[in-house]
Amino acid sequence: MANKGKRLRAAYEGVDPTSALDLAEAVKAIKARATAKFDETVEVAMNLGVDPRHADQMVRGVVSLPHGTGKTVRVAVFAKGDKAEEAKAAGADVVGAEDLMQEVQAGTINFDRCIATPDMMGVVGRLGKILGPRGLMPNPKLGTVTPNVTEAITAAKAGQVQFRVEKAGIVHGGVGRVSFSDEQLAENIHAFVDAIIKAKPSGAKGTYVKKISLSSTMGPGLRVNIASVATPV
């Protein structure tokens, strides 16, 4: 723990938590402070002026990052017959129906994204209490309940990120790795922020985007000048 403390203290040197950096400066600073022995994930966190306890202030959706996330995504598909074969051909890691439901009920969840054809929702619906809290429940609004399984699998593996605002009005997501170029990270961050802005709910009042921060897995959080990422709402 002592070494970790020293590394974090060193990472925070020169960081002013009260000031906001332009996006290009923040990306460079995050990469310079990412000193872990693995390829750290870069994450964006946004404080929004919403109260998700109200249905008309919920912020939820998906965004396809232009350069992907740098993460290998394991995809499970609930499907039968021809759609199951299509899912396998499209690169799904796990494909099944009632058998897959039983595996999940038994505690085996070896996937990061779950897709289902509409006819399988009767089966998947029984897993709501298991998949829901993990953010894995298929949802037609997110494109994960669909007859177009090939398209959904391709999008998931290509860097599609799901987002959902938390109780405190914060939404966050991984937007790449520190090994990405500055330009790749900046473009991914722009895409993520723009998606959140476009998802502004009808019930949001006042300032919508209050704060944007950037961090790496083991590094400090840096405030980003909102105007350098997107036009404030």
Image: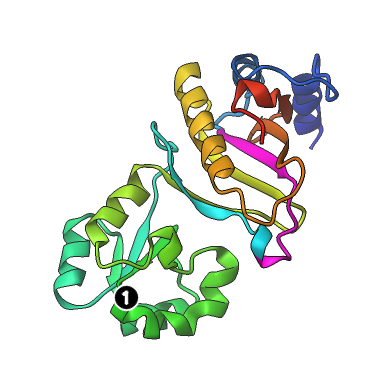
**Does 147 sit above or below residue 90?**
below
Residue sitting at x 71%, y 60%:
52
In depth, the one of 108 and 119 nearer the eye is 119
Residue sitting at x 45%, y 38%:
69
In terms of image quadrants, where is residue 94? Answer: bottom left
Label 1 belongs to which residue?
118
**Residue 77 in the figure: left or right of residue 167:** left
Query: Residue 127 appears at what percent x and percent y?
Result: 48, 80
In terms of image quadrants, where is residue 86? Answer: bottom left
**Does 111 sit above or below residue 42?**
below
Q: Residues within 10 Å of mark 1 (few under 14, many from 20)?
A: some
In terms of image quadrants, where is residue 47? Answer: top right
Residue sitting at x 32%, y 75%:
118
The residue range painted magenta reads 41-55
Query: Residue 30 appears at what percent x and percent y?
Result: 64, 22
Quadrant placement of the C terminus: top right
**Does 208 sit above or below residue 156?**
above
Whether residue 111 is visible, yes or no, is no
Tag 1: amino acid: Pro
In depth, the one of 36 and 92 nearer the eye is 92
In depth, the one of 215 and 52 nearer the eye is 52
Q: Secondary structure at mark 1?
A: helix
Tell me, yes or no, whether the highlighted magenta stretch contains residue 42.
yes
Quadrant placement of the N terminus: top right
**Residue 5 in the figure: left or right of residue 150:** right
Tell me, yes or no, whether the highlighted magenta stretch contains residue 230.
no
Whether residue 121 is visible, yes or no, is yes
Query: Residue 231 appears at what percent x and percent y?
Result: 61, 28
In depth, the one of 102 and 2 nearer the eye is 102
Residue sitting at x 60%, y 69%:
133
**Residue 225 in the figure: left or right of residue 195:** right
